[in-house]
Every structure is written in structure tokens, then in C-alpha cells.
Amino acid sequence: MARKFVISPTKLRTYLLCPAKYRLEYIDKVGRFYHRARAGYAFGHSLHRALDAFHNAGGAEAVTAEDLTASLEQVWVAKGYADAEQETAYRAEGLRILQEYHATAAEARQQAAPETPPPALLWTEKTLRIDLSPDVALSGRIDRVDEHADGALEIVDYKSGRDAVSEGDVRDSLALSIYQILVKTKLPDRRVFATLVALRTGARASHELGDDERAEVSAACLETGEEIRTREWESVLPVVNDHCPYCDFLPHCARFWRKEARQQGVPPPEIARGV
Ligand code: SF4
């Protein structure tokens, strides 16, 4: 039996941002020559790892604030910082975030009424996959799923660079919508909703997709997945777009545009690299 084509939030997002980027990343597979480490990614990854370990070990009930902050050192990703000063500033911010995260978690435990205990950890770093059609499957790796006392399942996603999050952010997040589809398909009897946590401030926002919304997102994923699966990649070439300044493949595409411009006798597009 032929293997199914598997799409994920990252693949879909990449394709929707720029089909040429998808080609370079997943068809030509030249990403290793262009990917740059970034402070924001390294910082977010370090915090994710520390919080995963914290929740897996039993949360605030089992792990002290000192142990949680000390764990940051063990999981710290040092690549991507401009210099030692920037890394030190990020590390200090990481320690502050973890201290406050622990205080909030401990307080929630203390204040929880016996009839409504705080949610229990169900999964961390869980990969789920469902079939959308005979040819296309949808897969996603979920940071964390909590199980509430009433059986509801809460998908929790952390944002390390944000001070605020809104219900609209959760509703409009393709990844969180896909995670809700995956969990609800696997456990259809449960209520499933998603929450974003802004780690810098502890702000949280949640949204629950209705049946119609999940069906709509599933259909859109299948349509885009089918388009990706059947696309003729030879003819997919770089086209300047709003994402280019932030894209790791900009040097590759800039070379392509310079060559094209030389052949046409016109000036190449000038794109300043963003952060
Ligand atoms: S630089 Fe622009 S055109 Fe090239 S892959 Fe990135 S987003 Fe696409």
C-alpha cells in the first residue's frame, strides 16, 4: 500500500507563507545550508524543555521553585544569541519567568476547592495522527494536554516572546486548531479546547472550536494537503513576498533573483534582512 502524504501545522504554515520555501525545505531539502539559530527560538525551546520536565515530574507539588529554575541550566540552548550579554539577559528573564510560573502553579494548587481539583497532566510532547483521506494524513506534536476534573481536555501551548494573548489568537492559530481536531478525533466523547500561555506575564487565553469550525479547518487542511501532494515542484520558483525579510532562504532566493535580473537586464529586488 502506498504511504500516505502526511501534513503538519509546520508544513502547512510553510506552504501558505511561500510555496518556494516549502519546496526548498521539504522537496529540495536544502534547509541545513541556510537555517540560522535565533535567540528567540533558543529561548523558547529552553523554556519549553524546562516546563515539560517540570510538569512530567509532577508540577509544583513535586518540584520546588529552586529545582525548576536550576533545571533551566540543564536544558539551556546556547545557540543563536548575538553575544554573551544578550544570552545573560535572556537567561535572567528565563529564571524570572520560571519563578513566577512556579508561584502561580503553587497558588492554583493551594486555592483549588476539593470538588474542583486543578487539571492533571495527560500528555506532554504527544504526536497524534489522523487520516483526512485515502491519500493525506494530518499529524501534529502537542506540547501539553491537561485533563480537567469534568473530563475536558485542555491543549496548552506556551508563547515565550509575548506579553499578552487573546481568545482571537487561539481561534486563529492553525496549529491549535489542528491540535484540537487531532485530540477530538482520538477522544470524541471529551470536550476539547486550547489555551495559549504568554510566559512573560502568565496571561492566558482559551478557545474551543465548534464542530463546524473543526470540519471547516479539516477540509481546508485536506485541500491544501492535496495541493501540496500533487504539485509540480519544478515550476515553483521564488516570488518576493512579505515573509522574505525573515526567511532563512533569502540568500538563496536573492541569488536566483540576481541571475534572473541579469538575464532580463533589470535591477534585482532589494530586500533588507529582518530580525
Ligand atoms: S526568501 Fe522569500 S521567496 Fe524565498 S523562500 Fe523565503 S519567503 Fe519564499
Image (cartoon, rainbow, N blue to C red):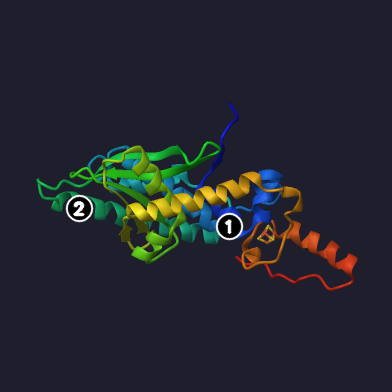
Residue farthest along the top direction in this orientation? 1
Residue farthest along the left direction in this orientation? 114
Label 2: state its secondary structure. Answer: helix
152, above or below 263, in the image: above
Locate the C terminus and report the quarter of the image it occupies: bottom right
Q: Residues within 10 Å of mark 2 (few under 14, many from 20)?
A: some
Q: Which of 151 and 95 is in front in this view?
A: 151
The answer to whether mark 1 is within 8 Å of ligand 1 is: no
Q: Position of residue 71 (x, y in %)?
A: 39, 44
Location of residue 164 by image quarter: bottom left
- Left or right, 48 with reference to 54: right
Dot in front, 1 or 2: 1
Task: Look at label 1 and name its amino acid.
Answer: Leu
- Left or right, 101 with reference to 34: left
243, above or below 153, in the image: below
Q: Where is residue 19 in the image (x, y as percent from the top left)?
A: 65, 55
Q: Nearer the viewer, residue 66 or 234?
A: 234
**Regarding ligand 1, which quadrant of the image does it lie in?**
bottom right
Task: Look at label 2 and name its amino acid.
Answer: Ala
Dot 1 or dot 2: first in sequence order is 1
Q: Residue at x 32, y 58 (%)?
A: 207
Q: Which residue is drawn at 56% across and 51% down?
A: 224
Residue 108 badge:
2
Location of residue 237 by image quarter: bottom right
- Left or right, 193 with reference to 266: left
Q: Position of residue 65 (x, y in %)?
A: 29, 48
Cα separation, mark 1 vs mark 2, equals 39 Å
Q: Which of 197 and 194 is in front in this view?
A: 194
Locate the N terminus and report the quarter of the image it occupies: top right
253, above or below 6, in the image: below
Q: Name the residue under label 1.
A: 16
Label 1: state its secondary structure. Answer: helix
